[in-house]
Image (cartoon, rainbow, N blue to C red):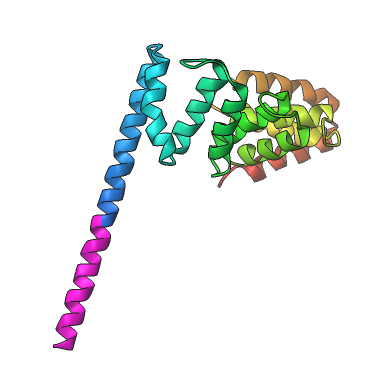
Amino acid sequence: MLHIRRHLFMLKLGLAIALALIIAASTATAQTSQFEKGIEAAHRGEYALAIEIWRPLADSGDLKAQTYIGLMYDNGWGVPQDYAEAHRWFLRAAEKGYAKAQYHLAFSYHQGRGVQRSQTEALKWYNLAAAQGNGPAQYNLGRIYAHGLVVRRDLVEAYKWLALAAEDPSSIAPLAARDRDLLVPKLTPEQLEVAEQRVKDWRPT
């Protein structure tokens, strides 16, 4: 009898876990669907509607929605332009590890938009975003190392980040490729070999 009860308990537990996973997946799918509706509204120029769609998602912890609301405030789309408010939204998502938000947060520190300018904070958040493969962050890191901003000038490290950014599918790639190629004459053959190896080592296997 004890064996049967235990079996029934495990069966109920398994069903409860399966049901919880289904509900979680359904919720995530619904949130994604709502987020895309916001994207569609933004593409139509209906920015206020996009924000209206995204805000409940953002309030419930959706990192993409938080970031895109930040972009709305950053650009003054559908709301009065407010860099400080944009910074607050970027920070919420960035602290949870969302790379796109980390990039925009870094840029706000870099430019002093809505927050006191801090190249140290900018470098920190660029590094975190770049480590997740964010192309614009990788590009800005390459520029930082190329010009010795905040960090000691390091053309090998600059080449690495620019080369990685050049592989990004975003519009930053051609610019990154150009800046990478401009570095080549400044590197010795040995430095170029080290730089290329760093690029290979960084790429996921």
Q: Where is residue 70 in the image (x, y as percent from the top left)?
A: 53, 27
Question: Is residue 75 rendered to the left or right of residue 161?
Answer: left
Residue 60 higher or lower than 39, as above or below: below
Residue 22 higher or lower than 186, as above or below: below
Question: Is residue 15 rendered to the left or right of residue 62?
Answer: left
Q: Position of residue 114 (x, y in %)?
A: 66, 25
Question: Is residue 94 rendered to the left or right of residue 8?
Answer: right
Q: Which of 6 and 151 is in front in this view?
A: 6
Q: Which of 190 and 100 is in front in this view?
A: 100
Q: Where is residue 161 in the image (x, y as percent from the top left)?
A: 69, 33
How many numbered badges does the structure rendering display? 0
Is residue 10 in the magenta section? yes
Q: Which residue is drawn at 77% across and 29% down?
A: 144
Range of residues picked out in magenta: 1-19
Is residue 194 in the magenta section? no
Q: Which residue is drawn at 83% across and 38% down?
A: 190
Question: Is residue 195 rendered to the left or right of residue 171?
Answer: right
The N terminus: image quadrant = bottom left
Tell me the quarter of the picture where residue 197 sits. Answer: top right
Q: Position of residue 205 (x, y in %)?
A: 55, 47
Residue 192 seen? no
Q: Which residue is drawn at 33% across and 42% down?
A: 28
Identify the residue at the far top of this view: 45
